Image: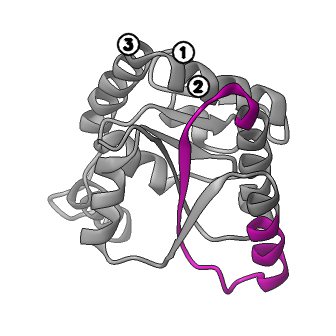
Amino acid sequence: MDGMHHVLYVGMVNEEKGLLDLVRALKLLANKDTKLVLHVAGRIDIEPDYYKKVREESLMGCVETVFHGFLNRHALDRLYSQAHIFVLPSRYETYGMVIAEAMAHGLPIVATDSGGIPELIESGKSGLLYKAGDIEKLSEYIQQLLASPSLRKYLGENALAKARSLPSWDDLQNAFKSLIRPNSPHSV
């Protein structure tokens, strides 16, 4: 690629998603000669003051951050395919659709151990999980992944295998339909 490591975050830029933690974790790596770019894909207008704080702190910490805003599927798929790792520092996620998307792209993932995320990621096998707010651990995991192509490959391959085992949208629709119409041929 371009000699840079590309870290991807997909989600709204609001406090609940924890993007400021990610920026702070990356700032800790700035002194380690790590060349990286943080790509942020998602709406920035939800909490304008929070977005401003994230943007300012990323500039102060010499973290090259590209805010892409809300993207169509094609543009988002391109970012997933260019990323080296995916990070979701969310304070709470019920499911984490973006994690399933990152897994489907074979990306190694660093995410919090909150909500439904541990249902998708087995820490150490298909990603790395940490406690929300632990910026030092987040930074440590990112550094481990950036320093080890073999670890990225291992976690990415396992993430892809896990993604292939997840139910499709059609499977989910059929399951919901069977709940609505219990006597339908799709009933469990």
The picture places residue 160, in percent across and down from the top left corner, at: 29, 32
x, y (%) of residue 141?
65, 24
- Please check the rendered image and state whether residue 26 is part of the magenta-colored stretch, yes or no: no
Residue at 36% of width from left, 27% of height from top? Answer: 156
Q: Would you say 80 lies left or right of 138 here?
A: left
Upstream in sequence: badge 3 or badge 2: 2
Query: Tag 1, which secondary structure?
Result: loop
Asked if residue 59 lies left or right of residue 7, the reply is right
* Residue 35 image offset from top left, x and y in percent: 55, 38
Quarter holding residue 114? top right
Question: Disc 3 marks which residue?
Answer: 150
The magenta stretch spans residue 34: yes
Tell me, yes or no, whether the two marked residues, 2 and 1, touch with CB atoms within 8 Å.
yes
Q: Is residue 152 visible?
A: yes
Point out which mark residue 128 bears. 2
Q: Quadrant of residue 176?
A: bottom left
Q: Secondary structure at mark 2?
A: strand
Element class at badge 3:
helix
Q: Residues within 10 Å of mark 2 (few under 14, many from 20)?
A: many
The span shown in magenta is 30-56
- Does residue 122 appear in the picture of this structure? no
Q: Mark 2 to mark 1: distance in Å? A: 5 Å
Q: Residue 170: percent from the left, percent from the top?
A: 21, 60
Q: Amino acid at mark 2?
A: Leu
> Closer to the N terminus: mark 3 or mark 1?
1
Task: Give the residue displayed 44% in from the left and 31% down from the top.
Answer: 108
